[in-house]
Image (spheres, helix red, strand yellow):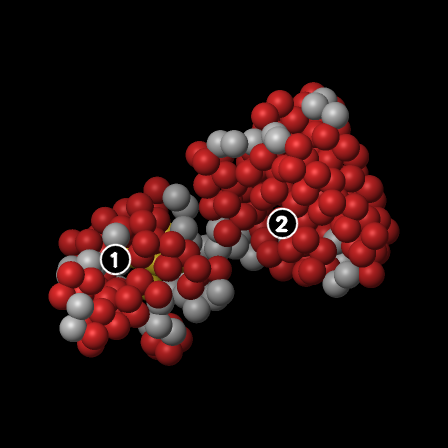
Amino acid sequence: MKKGQTKKPAAAKAVKTAARGGDKEAAHHLPSVQEICDEIVKLIEEDVFSPGERLREQDLADRFGVTRGRVREVLHSLEARGFIVIERMKGAAVARHDKREFKAIAQVRARLVSLAALRAAEDSTKPERDEIVKLAKDLVAKGPDMSAQDFRLATIRLVFAICDAAHSGFLRRIIDDVHRMPTSGRALRNLIVADRDRRVYAGKKWKSVAEAIAKGDGAKASALVDEIYASGLSAMEQLIEASGS
C-alpha cells in the first residue's frame, strides 16, 4: 500500500487534528463506516488504490485510526457495492473488471439514467429544469471542441443534475457508485467520445433529453436516454472487438 501512504484522507485527518488540539469530544469522534467507505472510494477513483491492489486490514485501521473490526465492516460494505472483492485466505483487493464486464456495468447505468430522466420529467422543479437545460446547451455549444475527458465529465455533471431532479437519494447513490466503479471503463468511455462527430451527436441528443424533461415528457426523455446509451454501447462493442478482448 506504498502508493497510498502519502495521502491523508479527511476522515483520518479529522481524528488526528482533534487529538492534537486537545478537543476531547472531537478526538473521540471516530470516522463512521460510511465516511471511511467514501474516502476509500475516492482513493480508488483517484487510482491511489489500483484495481487488483490488496487492502490490508491493519494498514487501513492505522490509516483511519479505527479498529480492525470497523475496517471489516467497511470492507464488507465496499464488497456489496462492487468496489472490492474479498477472497478466502487472501483478503480484500480492489475489484478488477475486464471490458466485457464493463459492458454489463454500462448497460445497468443506461437503465438507471433512463429511469432518472423519467422521474425528473415528473418531479423536477423549475430551477432544476432550468439548470438541466443550461448544462445541455453548454454541452452542445462547447462539447465539439472539448477533449474527450472533459466532454465525458461535462456529461456526468448533466446526468447527476438529472438524477438530483429525480428526487431519489437511493437512485442517485446507485448511479454514483456505478460511475465510480474501478474499471478500465473511464479510458474506454473517453475513446467513445474521442471523435468530434460523436460529441456533436451526443450533445444534441442530451439537449433533446433536457427539453423533454423541461416539458414534463418523461417517456420521451427516457427513450432519448436509451438512444444515447445504445449508440454508446454499440461504439464500445466495436472498440472491444477491435482490441481483441
> For residue 58, which quarter of the picture?
bottom left
User: Do the residues under discs 1 and 2 have CB atoms within 8 angstroms?
Assistant: no
The reply, left or right, for residue 93 in relation to residue 138 is left
Residue 244 appears anywhere in the view: no
**Amino acid found under the numbered disc labelled 1:** Pro
In this view, the residue in front, 6 or 194, is 6
Any part of residue 136 in sight: yes
Q: Is residue 181 above or below residue 164?
A: below
In the rendered structure, which amino acid carries the disc numbered 2?
A: Arg
Say which mark, if any, is on residue 157.
2
Res 31 label? 1
Q: Where is residue 211 in the image (x, y as percent from the top left)?
A: 77, 32
Res 143 label: none
Image location of residue 42, percent across then percent down:
44, 60
- Give the mark nearest the N terminus, 1 or 2: 1
Mark 1 vs mark 2, CA separation in Å: 28 Å
Q: Which residue is drawn at 70% across and 39% down?
A: 130
Q: Nearer the viewer, residue 180 or 100?
A: 180
